[in-house]
Amino acid sequence: MKVSATLKGQPDGQDRYAIYIRVADGKNRVTTATKYRVLDSQFEKGKVVKHPQAAEINAALRVMIAKKEIGSGKQGIGAEFADYVDHLISEFERQRSYETIRQYKAEKTKLRSFRKHINLLQIDSEFLRSYAAYCRGLGNQENTVWKSFKFMRMLLRKALKEKVITENPFDSFAMPKYRDPKKTYLTIDQIHIVERKLPEMADMKLVASWFLIG
């Protein structure tokens, strides 16, 4: 069985062709349309080239191909962690905030500094424990570690739902705990200092007033 990306159908008004995922098993051929369209000159040997979003589209195509391979019984295929993050970004970039997308990219960079290449199927409970130790070794506070693993858990749950992986390693891993941060407050003397400075603050007066209320 061979799974690959291909162009198919008639071009649209901008001369772009639809990209399909093709599954070839002997004489049988099954194709599934994707949401992506490119010019004929932007597609070579199953990959998008010379396109401003080539990296993101190719990452999404690799994930789709992996899902087809897993679904056809070819175990051990999975998808690269970095590719799957790019797949998430491609799917969520118009639905989630800029800050959320920025966090996804930051989490990808941090994990790749720990292990440059990691297939989702290689992420098991032992890998998660090692990564937690690595994050703490970077000096990450417990809530920062929790935030990284919250992202990882969300990603793996989605991969499991999409059948990119067959098991969730979090089923046998103790998730880092979120701890309520210790809150500090101004003393009465500090409040009086800010109050006395308010008349001198000009444009910052409103901000300082709200700061005191907070």
Image (cartoon, rainbow, N blue to C red):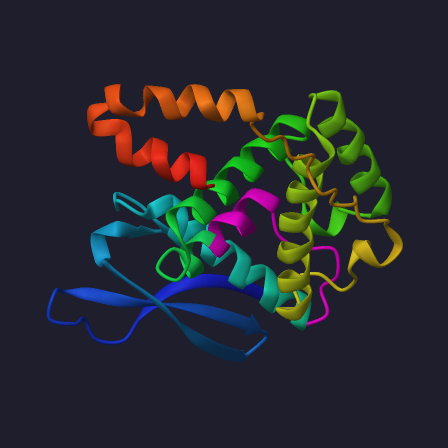
Q: Is residue 177 left or right of residue 95?
A: right
Vertical position of residue 50 compared to residue 208: above or below: below
Vertical position of residue 210 compared to residue 24: above or below: above
Residue 58 in percent (x, y) is at 42, 51
The one of 211 and 145 positioned closer to us in this rendering: 211
Q: In the displayed orientation, state which residue is furthest to the left.
A: 13
Asked whether residue 45 appears in the rendered view, the answer is: no
For image coordinates 51% across by 21% down, the residue present is 190
For image coordinates 69% across by 65% down, the residue present is 160
The one of 130 and 87 positioned closer to us in this rendering: 130
For image coordinates 25% across by 51% down, the residue present is 42
Q: Is residue 5 left or right of residue 182?
A: left
Q: Is residue 129 left or right of residue 134?
A: right
**Range covered by the magenta-colored residues:** 72-88
The one of 173 and 160 positioned closer to us in this rendering: 173
For image coordinates 65% across by 41% down, the residue present is 148
Residue 117 in percent (x, y) is at 64, 35
The quadrant in which the N terminus is found is bottom right
